[in-house]
Structure formats: C-alpha cells, structure tokens
Image (tube, helix red, strand yellow):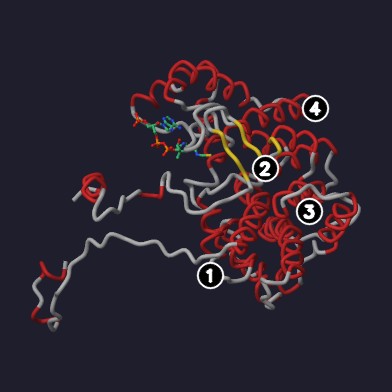
Amino acid sequence: MGQKQFIESSRDQGGIVFRPGLEGVPVTHSAICDIDGIQGKLSYRGYSIEELASQSTFLETTYLLIWGELPNPQQLRDFEEEVQRHRRVSFRVRDMMKCFPATGHPMDALQSSAASLGLFYSRRAIDDPQYIYDAVVRLIAKIPTMVAAFQLIRKGQDPIQPRDDLAYSANFLYMLTEREPDPLAARILDKCLILHAEHSLNASTFSARVTASTLTDPYAVVASAVGTLAGPLHGGANEDVLAMLEEIGKPQNAANFLQKAITSKTKVMGFGHREYRVKDPRASILQGLAEELFARFGKDEMYEVAKAVEDESLLNLASKGIYPNVDFYSGLVYRKLGIPRDLFTPVFAISRVAGWLAHWREQLGANRIFRPTQIYTGFSGRSWAPPEDRSMKESN
Ligand code: COA
C-alpha cells in the first residue's frame, strides 16, 4: 500500500486521524514565539522581529526568550558578564575535538561536543533555578567557542582563546577568522543571530522538547536538537541557495531556470515555508543586511542573480504562496562575513540554542513526557520456525 493510500485509509480509524509529520497538530501551549504566516509577522514574547533586530542584541534577546521579559540593566550586565566568563572550554573538550576526523561535518562535531558538556557538568538539578541559569550561560557561552575551535582544528591549527574585550558576536568572528572583525560585520552577525534564535515548533525545537520531556539534562536536549537541525530538510538550505545561484550564474538566466524548475517540479532553494504564505519577514531583514554589507565591503556578484530569481518568482511562484524564506539571503550575508559554507548551519545552531533552551524551560514548567501513538500495520500471530524451514518468500 502506498503512503498516500495508507494516509487516506487510516483517517478516522476509531476516531484517530493520522497526520504524517504531525502537520497542523498542536502538541503544546507556548508563549515564546508567534508566527502569522498570512501577514508575514514574527514576534518573540510579543516583540516584533523587526524591532528586536534593529534595537536589541543577541544576548538580550536570548534572555528575553528564555526568561520571558527583557532584562533590566543589572540583569543584562550580569548575564553578559557570566556568558563572557564561561566562553572558554576545557582542554579536555579541545583534545577530544582534535581526535575528530578533519573531514567530518562541523554539525557532527558540534553535536558531539555539546553532548560532552553533560560529562563535565553532570549534576542534574532541573528544579533549581540557579542550575537552569548556569546551564543556559554555559551553553550560550561555549557553543560558539566549540564551532570556532573545530574550524581551526580541522585546518591543523590550535583553537584560539576567546577575547574578553570583545562582545559575543565579535568574539565569535575573531575566534573563527583569527582577526578582530570590523564592528559593522560583528553587528550584522549579531542581528543574524537574533533572526535565527527562535521559530516555534520546528523539527529541532520539537526534538528539544521531546528530549526535555524525559527530564534529562540540558546538554542532551541541545545535542539532540543539533542532530535534528543537521538534516537537509531543516538547517542548511542556505548552502544549497548559494550552489543554486552559482548554477544560474547570471541574472538573465533566472527566468529560464525558474521555468525549468517549475516544469520539472524541482524545489527552488530558499523558497517556500510551511508557515508563511508571503515573504518571510526574516528574509526581508536579511536582504537589507546583505545590502548594508555589500555597500561597505563590496557586492557579492550572486546578489544580482538572487534579486532576479526573486523578481521572476513573483510571476510564477507567488500565486502559490511561495516566497523567499529565511535561507534565501542568509548565505550571501554569511559568505560576506567570511563564514565558510559548511559552517552556515553551525552558526544557525549558535543562535537557535536560545530558542531550544527557552522551550526546555517552558517544557519543564508543565511537563508531560511525549509518547505519541501509532497505527500498527505489521503482521500478527506468526509462528517462529527454524531457519531451514523458512522459505525465501517468508524471509523476505
Ligand atoms: N520551489 C518550488 N515549488 C515549491 C517550493 C519551492 N521552494 N516549495 C513548495 N513548492 C510547491 C510544491 O511543489 C507543491 O506544489 P504542488 O501543490 O503543485 O505539488 C506546493 O508548493 C506545496 O509544497 P510542499 O512541499 O507540500 O510544501 P511544504 O509546506 O511541505 O514545504 C518546504 C515547505 C520549506 C519544505 C518547501 O517549501 C521546500 O522544500 N523549500 C525549499 C527548501 C528550503 O528553502 N528550505 C528552507 C526552509 S526555511
């Protein structure tokens, strides 16, 4: 039986409606992030993404997401100082990372390193607000250090230590590129981190909540979410967008490329979203950030190709509610910031850890272990037979 027939046949079986991928099925209440996919609006804790991206910082937004309110000046100072103090990772973590194969994907390196933190901070006291605060600080502080460390280690270099005089995003770019970044570049990365910090119950956040619901430690929660984010259907479409733009090559090829994609039902990378029927508000902000960067550091020639693809898409994809998503312009921004292509998803993870931890805390506040059900489609009542008595057909 094909999957489609199976879906149809299993509807309304004993009152159970089967929704593959849980599409449209609410599985939690949440007060963290609201998406209006028709109006193209996104807000964190009631604050619009536009306002946060223009006024806030990544660390302030992280605090807002996790504790529900913007911090007062003392809370913000304390949080920033704590994060700064915990940026270093143990030499044991660095040594462990030196044993990772240099050809391995940075997301796999990050998942392993994040999980290893649970070994170093093995006390599990998820009822203790101080434990929660400390775990948040450690994860927010150390994930960028681990991403940058793997980048240098795989090039055969020693990781460099964080610099206490640099703010969060500037320090990450410094650890990655070994150069103090231009303040504009650091500010734009910080805005990118705000834009990617949270997006309701996507696959990795759901994964985080499922793991959290077992009452395990936050390092396991983040490691499972990193593993989920690594898949090509979730993080990583921005890498494919750059490849696609390079394949198109010139703005004048955009119309032909789109027509071919539509005829052959090939997905145009960086377009479409389960939640949005209009242009993703983050894509509009990222496009503005790309333009700011290009005005200062020179244009990426693929930007004109991207704009031509977007213009053409208005003629043939927009009628289906398919518009640029967050990944369409982010790769161009990251490339201009000097971030290697296979680090785009780890940079996404650096940011999304804020959302995962907000959901971890929310899940703990009203926990019920996730344990969905299934519709069994296998055999029943079979009898075991010794191998020599099994026909080929049966063993298939
Ligand atoms: N390019 C062309 N057509 C697209 C499209 C795209 N990027 N995304 C969706 N469509 C079309 C589908 O072909 C389908 O058309 P049909 O009804 O004629 O068959 C229709 O829109 C619905 O597509 P579907 O895949 O069911 O939508 P979804 O909500 O499940 O998919 C995505 C959402 C994000 C998975 C999908 O749009 C996609 O794969 N986009 C490209 C990858 C990407 O940019 N991912 C990053 C997401 S932030």
Mark 2: secondary structure:
strand
Q: Nearer the viewer, mark 4 or mark 1?
A: 1
Mark 3: secondary structure:
helix
Q: Residues within 10 Å of mark 4 (few under 14, many from 20)?
A: few
Residue 111 lies, with reference to residue 265, above or below; the image says: below
Per the image, the residue denoted by label 2 is 44
> Which amino acid type is shown beneath numbered disc 3?
Met
Q: Position of residue 395 (x, y in %)?
A: 15, 71
Q: Nearer the viewer, mark 2 or mark 4?
A: 2
Mark 2 vs 1, N-terminal side: 2
Mark 4 vs 3, N-terminal side: 3
In the image, taking residue 115 as reference, residue 149 lies left or right, namely right
Per the image, the residue denoted by label 4 is 296
Residue 83 lies, with reference to residue 314, above or below; the image says: below
Per the image, the residue denoted by label 3 is 175
> Which amino acid type is shown beneath numbered disc 2?
Tyr
How many angstroms separate mark 2 from mark 4 (CA)? 30 Å
Per the image, the residue denoted by label 1 is 214
Mark 4: secondary structure:
helix
Depth check: 236 or 221 in front? 221
Depth check: 333 or 361 in front? 361
Q: Residues within 10 Å of mark 2 (few under 14, many from 20)?
A: many
Q: Residues within 10 Å of mark 3 (few under 14, many from 20)?
A: many
Mark 1 vs 3, N-terminal side: 3
